[in-house]
Amino acid sequence: SATIISTVNGREEKEYDAEINRIYNETGSQRMMLTVTDPELRSITGGIVQGMSGSPILQNGKLVGAVTHVFINDPTKGYGIYAYWMYEQMR
């Protein structure tokens, strides 16, 4: 289980429940597939929407990644990139 921190009402950030479904360890980039499980976020936006890219993904209160994009055919699912990989690219 995980949470996504995002601002969907334009005023304040909030944590929304999600699940990390799959971990990809490909050469050159590392990403994860996630599903939005939070009923509030799903009712407001349908899931991951444009503008949520970069939203932090937390697991056990620790930063593990950021939202990158959504599945076009299912907005409840999308991809995130590992925080560690982003850090390594900056070094």
Image (spheres, helix red, strand yellow):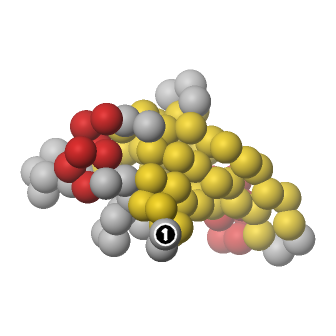
Q: In the picture shown, does residue 51 fall above or below 34?
A: below
Q: Amino acid at mark 1?
A: Asn
Q: Tell me if residue 32 can be seen.
A: yes
In front here: 47 or 9?
Answer: 47
Residue 2 drawn at (x, y percent)? 53, 34
Q: Residue at 58%, 58% (x, y): give it.
A: 80
Q: In the picture shown, does residue 67 fall above or below 4?
A: below
Name the residue tied to disc 1: 73
Q: Residue at 49%, 69% (x, y): give it.
A: 73
Residue 22 drawn at (x, y percent)? 73, 48
Q: Residue at 44%, 53% (x, y): give it.
A: 76
Q: In the picture shown, does residue 14 fall above or below 72?
A: above
Q: Tell me if residue 62 can be seen.
A: no
Q: Quadrant of residue 48?
A: bottom left
Crowd around label 1: few <14 · some 14–19 · many ≥20 (10 Å): few
Q: Quadrant of residue 29?
A: bottom right
In front here: 49 or 86?
Answer: 49
Q: Quadrant of residue 41?
A: top left
Q: Is residue 28 left or right of residue 76?
A: right
Quarter of the image with the N terminus in it: top right
